[in-house]
Image (spheres, rainbow, N blue to C red):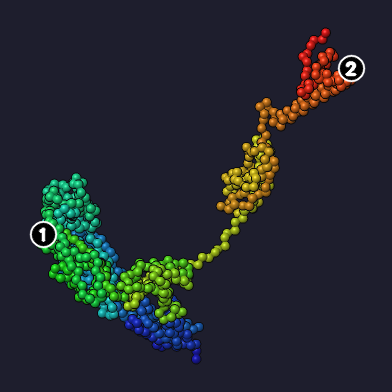
Amino acid sequence: MGSAPPTFTDTPAQYVEAKEGGSITLSCTAFGNPKPVVSWIREGERLVDSEKYKVSDGSVTVRSIHREDRGAYTCRAHSVQGEAIHTTRLLVQGPPFIVSPPKNITVNISQDALFTCQAEAYPGNLTYTWFWEEDNVYFKNDLKLRVRILIDGTLNIFRVKPEDAGRYTCSPSNSLGHAPTASAHLIVQYSARVLNMPPVIYVPRKLPGFIRCPADANPPVTSVKWEKDGLPLRVEKYPGWSQLEDGSIRVEEVTEDSLGTYTCEPHNVMGTMGKSAPATLVLKDPPYFNVRPGGEYRQEAGRELVIPCAASGDPEVPTIVWRKVGKPSKSQHHILPSGSLKFSSLSKEDHGEWECVATNVVTSITASTRLLVIGTSPHAPTNIHVLVSATSANVSWEPGYDGGFEQTFSVWYGPVVKRAQFGPHDWRSVAVPGARSWLQVQGLEAETAYQFSVLAQNKLGTGPFSEVVTVNTLVFPISTPETLVLLTPPRCLTANRTQQGVLLTWLPPANHTSPIDHYIMEFRLGERWEVLSDAIPAGETERLVKDLVQESWYEFRVMAVMENVISENSNIVGNLFSTPEMADEGMARPVVAGIVATICFLAAAILFSTLAACFVNKQRRRKFKRKRDPPLSITHFRKSIETPIPLTPLPGIEPYWERPDESSYRPPRTSPQ
């Protein structure tokens, strides 16, 4: 048999249909010699076995069909003799898909508004429905005569009014599946206007009162002008009067002077629609309580309780309502004709703050009381706060009402992502010791989301869980290696004496990874180092030091600074330094000191020589005297003691002797004969 190019003997139809969510098989058979290889191609890629497709022996099965699976599927049979191609288009039957949803639009009052909405579907017998808020636009009385829905889904609104503003929803349908929806908002801009100004404004006598202007505008009201009795009202001229941000007038104490007829005129950036109708201000006494509820009531659960409240007013009796502060109570309670609040059977939900509100046309007054329902399980803790670290969490809370009995707490926690080791409930509980209102939870995992809640219990049982707080634990602090900063100390520090002081010089550091910022110089005069200068510019490598203490031992060192890093200190230089100073005569002090020392030495030598000469001379006179005077007898000596014998002095020698009282006597000097 001879060679033959591939030809198809069986192919699917040019168009095939399949329902969304179902599956379909496309088969293709080809003949040729040699036998051709059959493959399926979609969007330029060959289909292979996968979760979406099953390919085998020239057929392909498309599973779990979605809208995205629609389009062309190509069967290709090829061999060395050539190829044959057949294309089939898959049409997916399903509900419409909105390809162009409506967009928000803003129009001025009296203009037309247009919303577009485009959808695709197979089959394409689409019908469009539009809604304003939750109502069909054709069911809204004032709107149904001014709207039109075109065949392509476009919504036209003619001569829009402020009341037309809101959310508009497009919903295309082809009777298959659930119809999709898409919404957009219509914003209508208009000048400021007054809505329903009351003909009479009641204000309480001798109490704060308000004169309000019921204005409406988009953009919002920017200012409100008031008139009183036909004349412009200057609020600032009335003591105790003020105009609020919304344009209302607040009167601190309403008196007879406030009476009159008032009109208001609101404005915004688009202007105003005019003044309001006149309103007459009327003074009335506010309502007052005949009977006020007590400050606090305690009663057991299941028992009956009546909380009194009664009010009066002029001219009509005020209306009394009771309301629970916070979460409303769903228990059995009702208001008696007198205004009192009656509980047929108290429940735990009745516990809390209650208000009796008396209202008339003038104002409302309020009286508060607290109801404590005892004999119940605890109330839920509030204000849960969780402070986390990497592996722990500090949980704190405010205890709720204990139900009349001592309560204890437990902290419940668990990861947001379920963990096998936590068991089927994924929550762990830790009992709180004593009456504390906090607990430190340990053993958490870093970078993990956890949920925390607090549960209270007393002898009657457990209360409800507190609110659940979700937090993420912190990341473990990871120490990263610091960038290597290389900075060696300054080099070759030397010190040289000069006439002006000591000159210190050095060389910059041999190695540094960044430019030097500046130098620091320190000195030591004793044991402690002190800063001499901490801002020596990087370009300077010498410093003259002056005013040093004479004959003192100084030591110096230098350090370099780079990017807040201080180097090791340089070599230390030290010596006995003194500051050369000049004497008044122009010579240095050491020279003057040498001269003075020499003079003192010479003077001392002269003085010593003089004293030595005097001593020698005296010794000679004594020797000469002993030679001339004969030895004295004892008798003569005694007599001489009793009566001094005058002696003829030798020339040049003064007479001298001792008296018996051991005092010396020297006769007066006489002239030589």
Which residue is pictured at 31% across the width and 80% down the height?
93
Which residue is pictured at 59% across the width and 56% down the height?
485
Could you tell me which quadrant the C terminus lies in?
A: top right
Tell me if I can see residue 130 in this picture: no
* Crowding near the residue tagged with mark 2, few <14, some 14–19, many ≥20 C-alpha atoms within 10 Å: few
Q: Is residue 116 left or right of residue 535?
A: left
- Where's residue 660, x and y in %? 78, 22
* Crowding near the residue tagged with mark 1, few <14, some 14–19, many ≥20 C-alpha atoms within 10 Å: some
Q: According to the image, label 2 marks what residue?
A: 628
- Say if 633 sits above or below 277 in the image: above
Tell me if I can see residue 517 in this picture: yes
- Where's residue 484, x and y in %? 59, 58
Question: Which numbered marker is on residue 314?
Answer: 1
State the image quarter where residue 378 is shown. Answer: bottom left
The residue lying toward the viewer, choosing from 348 and 300, is 300
State the image quarter where residue 361 is shown. Answer: bottom left
- Where's residue 106, x and y in %? 25, 61
Question: Which numbered marker is on residue 187?
Answer: none
- Where's residue 192, x and y in %? 20, 55
Q: Is residue 360 left or right of residue 47?
A: left
Q: Earlier in the sequence, mark 2 or mark 1?
A: 1
Which residue is pictured at 45% across the width and 87% down the height?
57
- Say if 277 sits above or below 600 in the image: below
Q: CA distance from mark 2 to mark 1?
A: 159 Å
Which residue is pictured at 47% across the width and 71% down the height?
442
Residue that extends furthest to the left in the rendered view of this protein: 315
The residue lying toward the viewer, choosing from 35 and 251, is 251
The residue lying toward the viewer, choosing from 571 and 619, is 619
Indicate the secondary structure of the residue bearing disc 2: helix
